[in-house]
Image (cartoon, coloured by chain):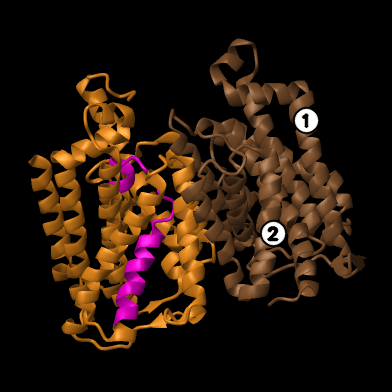
């Protein structure tokens, strides 16, 4: 319960940002941080609770993004409907992929590989067929109306992403405290033992990947409506997959606040690097990659893990080594 | 109906390309067989090897085939050191952490290349790049035929190394039973690093054989490594013969697919195979079920 109150308080504080922060540049920076937290938390549902490390979360993100864009342009479907459908389609693609891979108990290396390959298949497909605009990408026409999910004020986008991200974090809070989450963690820690006490591992993993795909899909829809442009490598390329996992790993896998912490630290760091070295091509990604390597080598449980170790040392419970 | 006279050259072409794919996949499957992890930095390291060949040519005028004497050894050292210093220390008891570290390494290496070399494509101009040889009525580029033979020889050498040397026995022992290998006195960290080094060294051979016909740019590894992943899955993870067979199949599928469906969609055939294997035979053609 305490975690829920802290969570709501943090989001209330974040939501107040547009009221005092007048700089569009910095408000946009905070917006992108919240958005990164959403990507990370969506990844965290599958990795931190389901125990499956995906290297291709762009698959669900891109599905959501293309869903809302294609429905709007080819079929004139309102983006708010596309928003829901984008999330659902993300979940559906996730379910299909999960079904194919979990059926044979593929995990670890194999699962990471398969997710990557699926994202790549979708990238090539969206690059080749005409209704996604192929390699030229897809441009959503400018129509700044709330009914078209396009806003004149940056703060409206800000509150929209806050709401989606809060929904995702609340889902994770519920997982941490509910039965489904308990089953997921049981499967994550020991699938055989979980099965032995009557947990249907397949169904639990599918629920984890569907939830994860749903929120990644929503993130994709938000991206499409915010930037109004998509191409195959934005939607299905490795950048989104890497950002999703990096945010969660830096913050702390399997924790409620980890992705938020990770997103904040990464974005502040990236901003600093840009400030000091400049915006050279490749440099920010190289820094991201280095952070990933350093975190895994020295703090595999993320910032949240470091915090926990320090706390237990202070309390003297001797839990630090865990 | 496709005429046989265009089909045969395209199959032969596919076989030569497939041999090169197989070469990239061989290192991947060796590393997987011993360390039980997928090396996500494989493509990035192939790119490094290709740039090595390119700069040796550019700065010292060294022919790519002569670079065979230098580059594989250099890549072996890079692989050995990477495993000893970074990858080997990353696991903390979880294989996922090794995956993440190799992914991180690939991001760092690729983007540093982008930073230093920009995204321009570079080629090595050899006098023999456009020589062709006639085989069964099909004209094949000479460098591709050399690459084909080179790939087969490399696979043979690896097979001999694994089967008939002490190092090979130690590697196989480690692949099968980590604890037991340590008990009989095998230096586990050293052998792990040797396996990783050999796997990366093979990339050096691949790079030397590739460059007379291919070009190099920072993301060049992507295309190769995804195909290599598919080959490894298709042939069975950890199986050498499987990697070779998988390479040939994928090469032919790509060439014939490109002929039938056109260049951009031709690659889809590769991924269709990937998903089909996953559905019906996830252990691969020659692999054993875990």
Residue A321: where, in percent of width, then height? Answer: 34, 23
Instruction: Find the magenta span and give its range.
Output: A45-71
Q: Point out which mark residue B251 bears.
A: 2
- Kindly tell me whether residue A100 is visible in this rendering: yes
Q: Residue furthest top?
A: B184
What distance separates the C-alpha of mark 1 from that of mark 2?
A: 26 Å
| Label 2: few (<14), some (14–19) or many (≥20) C-alpha neighbours in 10 Å | many
Q: Residue at x 45, y 75 (%)?
A: A231
Query: Is disc 2 placed on a helix, strand or loop?
Result: helix
Residue A87: where, in percent of width, then height? Answer: 26, 65
Is B114 or A112 nearer to us in this picture? A112
Q: Main secondary structure of the magenta part?
A: helix
Lower position in the chain sequence, tag 1 or tag 2: 1
Q: Residue at x 43, y 32 (%)?
A: B94
Q: Which residue is mark 1?
A: B161
According to the colouring, which chain is brown? Answer: B
Q: Residue at x 75, y 70 (%)?
A: B7
| Label 1: few (<14), some (14–19) or many (≥20) C-alpha neighbours in 10 Å | some
Is A47 or B51 nearer to us in this picture? A47
Nearer the observer: mark 1 or 2; the answer is: 2
- Kindly tell me whether residue B64 is visible in this rendering: no
Chain A takes which shade in the image?
A: orange
Quarter of the figure that contains the N terminus of chain B: bottom right
Query: Residue B188 falls in which quadrant of the image?
Result: top right
Q: Is B270 on the left or on the right of A300, as rendered?
A: right
Query: Is disc 1 placed on a helix, strand or loop?
Result: helix
């Amino acid at each position: 319960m305490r975690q829920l109150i802290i969570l709501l308080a943090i989001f209330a504080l974040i939501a107040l940002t547009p009221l005092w922060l007048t700089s569009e540049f910095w408000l946009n920076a905070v917006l992108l941080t919240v958005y990164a937290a959403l990507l990370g938390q969506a990844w965290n549902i599958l990795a931190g609770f389901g125990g499956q490390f995906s290297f291709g979360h762009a698959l669900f993100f891109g599905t959501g993004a293309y869903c809302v864009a294609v429905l709007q342009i080819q079929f004139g479907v309102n983006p708010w409907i596309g928003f829901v459908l984008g999330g659902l389609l993300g979940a559906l693609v996730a379910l299909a992929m999960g079904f194919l891979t979990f059926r044979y108990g593929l995990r670890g290396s194999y699962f990471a590989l398969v997710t990557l390959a699926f994202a790549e298949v979708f990238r090539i497909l969206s690059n080749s067929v005409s209704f996604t605009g192929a390699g030229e990408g897809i441009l959503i026409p400018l129509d700044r109306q709330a009914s078209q999910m396009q806003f004149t004020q940056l703060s409206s986008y800000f509150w929209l992403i806050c709401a989606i991200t809060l929904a995702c974090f609340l889902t994770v809070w519920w997982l941490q405290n509910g039965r489904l989450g308990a089953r997921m963690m049981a499967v994550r820690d020991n699938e055989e033992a979980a099965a032995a006490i009557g947990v249907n591992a397949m169904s639990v993993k599918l629920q984890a990947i569907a939830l994860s795909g749903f929120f990644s899909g929503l993130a994709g829809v938000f991206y499409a409506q915010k930037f109004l442009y998509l191409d195959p490598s934005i939607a299905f390329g490795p950048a989104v997959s890497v950002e999703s996992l990096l945010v969660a790993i830096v913050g702390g896998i399997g924790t409620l606040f980890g992705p938020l912490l990770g997103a904040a630290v990464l974005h502040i760091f990236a901003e600093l690097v840009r400030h000091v070295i400049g915006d050279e091509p490749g440099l920010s990604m190289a820094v991201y990659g280095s952070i990933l390597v350093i975190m895994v080598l020295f703090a595999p449980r993320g910032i949240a893990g470091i915090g926990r170790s320090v706390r237990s040392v202070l309390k003297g419970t001797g839990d630090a080594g865990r | 109906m496709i005429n046989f006279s265009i089909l045969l050259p395209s199959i032969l072409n596919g076989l030569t390309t497939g041999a090169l794919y197989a070469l990239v996949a061989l290192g991947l499957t060796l590393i997987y067989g011993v360390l039980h992890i997928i090396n996500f930095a494989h493509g990035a390291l192939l790119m490094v090897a290709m740039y090595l060949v390119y700069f040796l040519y550019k700065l010292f005028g060294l022919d790519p085939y002569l670079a065979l004497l230098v580059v594989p050894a250099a890549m072996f050292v890079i692989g050995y050191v990477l495993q000893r210093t970074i990858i080997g220390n990353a696991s903390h008891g979880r294989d996922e952490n090794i995956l993440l570290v190799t992914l991180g390494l690939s991001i760092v290496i690729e983007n540093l290349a982008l930073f230093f070399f920009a995204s321009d494509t570079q080629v090595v101009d050899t006098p023999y790049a456009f020589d062709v040889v006639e085989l069964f009525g099909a004209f094949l580029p000479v460098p591709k035929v050399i690459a084909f033979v080179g790939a087969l020889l490399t696979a043979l050498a690896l097979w001999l190394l694994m089967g008939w040397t002490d190092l090979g026995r130690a590697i196989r022992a480690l692949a099968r039973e980590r604890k037991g290998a340590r008990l009989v006195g095998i230096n586990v960290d050293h052998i792990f690093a040797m396996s990783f080094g050999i796997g990366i060294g093979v990339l050096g051979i691949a790079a030397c054989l590739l460059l007379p016909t291919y070009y190099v740019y920072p993301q060049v590894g992507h295309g190769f490594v995804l195909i290599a992943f598919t080959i490894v899955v298709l042939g069975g993870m950890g199986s050498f013969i499987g990697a070779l067979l998988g390479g040939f199949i994928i090469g032919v599928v790509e060439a014939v697919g490109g002929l039938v469906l056109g260049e951009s969609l031709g690659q889809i055939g590769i991924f269709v195979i990937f998903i089909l294997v996953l559905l019906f035979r996830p252990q691969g053609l020659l692999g054993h079920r875990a």
